[in-house]
Amino acid sequence: MISKDLVKGLNDQMNYEFYSAHVYLATAAYCSNESFDGFASFFLTQAEEERFHAMKFYHFINDMGEKAEVASLPTPNNTFSSILETFEKSLEHEKEVTKQIYKLSDLALDQREHATMTFLNWFVEEQVEEEATFDNLIQKLKRINDDSNAFFMLEDELGKRKFTAE
Ligand code: FEO
């Protein structure tokens, strides 16, 4: 049995992960519309990953004998001015996710809720990886600047990304 505020926090995070999938779907749509199919594919994979994150919360809430409450989602940003901006906005988004995961981890820690703490540790590690990925891609894109060959090589490389449930 976990406290009501912790159940609410877990549900809020589940819904925020669904929202994250929405955010990356909107980002992919911008890339597709600009005919950057490799970048679009990369963001579609990211959206799948976010749905997987949301479902991890869904299953954990159920496993703890509580009920997952699915909420409506805000409209994500659909307007971008460049590929660089898609990655900059992604990094901003991931920093927000990290803040929320930390807040939830603090709550679980305050309540000595060990099962939830262990569950959330996976997300703490995942956020390090997510922020590093976007930060690294922003640096690469800035270095590439106007080198169109390097830009398309990066797009090609990112387009090969596949979703793996791990
Ligand atoms: Fe599920 Fe990208 O955080």
Image: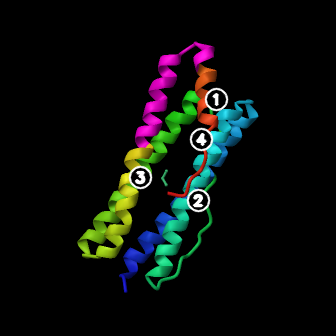
Is residue 137 part of the magenta span, yes or no? yes
What amino acid type should be assigned to the residue bearing mark 3?
Glu
Whether tag 1 and tag 4 are in contact, CB under 8 A, the answer is: no
The residue shown at (63%, 37%) is: 160
Residue 142 visible? The answer is yes
Q: Which residues are magenta?
A: 131-150
Cα–Cα span, label 3 and label 2: 14 Å
Q: Earlier in the sequence, mark 1 or mark 2?
A: 2
The answer as to whether callout 1 falls within 8 Å of ligand 1 is no
Q: Earlier in the sequence, mark 3 or mark 2?
A: 2
Tell me the SS state at disc 2: helix
Badge number at residue 156: 1
Q: Nearer the viewer, residue 10 or 148?
A: 148
What amino acid type should be assigned to the residue bearing mark 2?
Arg
Q: Disc 2 marks which residue? A: 51
The residue shown at (59%, 34%) is: 158
Q: Earlier in the sequence, mark 4 or mark 2?
A: 2
Residue 78 visible? The answer is no
| 61, above or below 117, in the image | below
Q: Nearer the viewer, mark 4 or mark 2?
A: 4
Tell me the SS state at disc 1: helix
The reply, left or right, for residue 29 in relation to residue 55 is right
The residue shown at (64%, 53%) is: 75
Cα–Cα span, label 1 and label 4: 10 Å
The answer as to whether callout 4 falls within 8 Å of ligand 1 is no
Badge number at residue 161: 4
